[in-house]
Amino acid sequence: MTSNKTKRTSIISWELIEDGGIEFFQFKSDNRLMFYSTKSNEERFLERFKPILLKQVHSDEIIDVDKDNGRVGDGLLTQRSNLALGIKIADCLPVYLYNETKLCLVHCGWHGIIKGIAKKAKRFMGNYKYVLGASIGHCCYEVKKDIARLFTQQYKNAVIRRNRKYFIDLKGAVIEDLGEEKLIASLDFCTKCHPEYFYSYRRGDKNKRDYAVGSLELSSVSSS
């Protein structure tokens, strides 16, 4: 679902891959590999890619796994190839940032966006490109007025009002933080609207998660 206020670019598209009995979304650019699980086989997806995962706490904390053994936060950073970074998604937005030497994967819910996690990732990366995964869309992400007010103060394109209700565009906010000119592609599905692919906390999947995984290079990944 795309925003009426924010134009989405998609120079290179995400692909739905079926490989080795696993169905997942895949994006490849400049030898950077990004993946997004589907609900049909998330356990096999994790077994396949073996990502480093975090205890996520809706923070702005980004862990450099090359230097820090900590695993509490909402972002991961590496310069190592053949290492998979992963985050759990319950409707929030996974953002994959990369440059010639680094990969950063961040979990952007409304708390993290307001705390500045995307802006922090931008500072860590220097020159970068970025890709957006799937998240709940502004079609479905209704919030209370106090949360809408926080976004209105920082993001001109992220709050939509319909029928006296407030809705947040997570992707619109992150694009304002990171710059539309650096956006390479977006997996533009609303996780709540598409139960054929994704779990959604707002739809009632309280104990299930989708997974976003990124790597500078994974030799075991299908080249299809």
Image: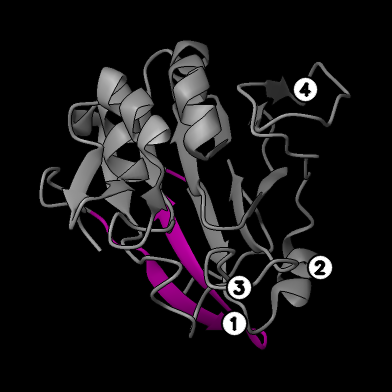
| Residue holding disc 4 | 66
Q: Amino acid at mark 1?
A: Asp
Dots 2, 1 in contact, CB < 8 A:
no
Q: Is residue 223 left or right of residue 189?
A: right
Which residue lies most toward the front here?
A: 164
Which residue occupies 50% across, 15% down? 120
Q: Earlier in the sequence, mark 4 or mark 1?
A: 1
Q: Earlier in the sequence, mark 2 or mark 1?
A: 1
Q: Amino acid at mark 3?
A: Gly
Dots 4, 1 in contact, CB < 8 A:
no
| Residue holding disc 1 | 19
Q: Earlier in the sequence, mark 2 or mark 3?
A: 2
Q: Amino acid at mark 4?
A: Asp
Marker disc for residue 47:
2
Assess whether residue 29 is covered by the magenta stretch: yes
Q: Earlier in the sequence, mark 1 or mark 3?
A: 1
Assess whether residue 200 is covered by the magenta stretch: no
- How far, Cα to Cα, is label 3 from label 4? 36 Å
Q: Residues within 10 Å of mark 4 (few under 14, many from 20)?
A: few
Q: Is residue 56 left or right of residue 89?
A: right
- How far, Cα to Cα, is label 2 from label 3? 25 Å
Q: Which residues are magenta?
A: 12-31
User: Which callout, 1 or 3, points to the residue nearer the camera?
Assistant: 3
Q: Earlier in the sequence, mark 4 or mark 2?
A: 2
Marker disc for residue 204:
3
Residue 59 image offset from top left, x and y in percent: 64, 26
User: Which callout, 3 or 4, points to the residue nearer the camera?
Assistant: 3
Q: Regarding mark 1 in the picture, which secondary structure is present there? A: strand
Q: Residues within 10 Å of mark 3 (few under 14, many from 20)?
A: few
Is 187 above or below relative to 33? below
Q: Regarding mark 4 in the picture, which secondary structure is present there? A: loop
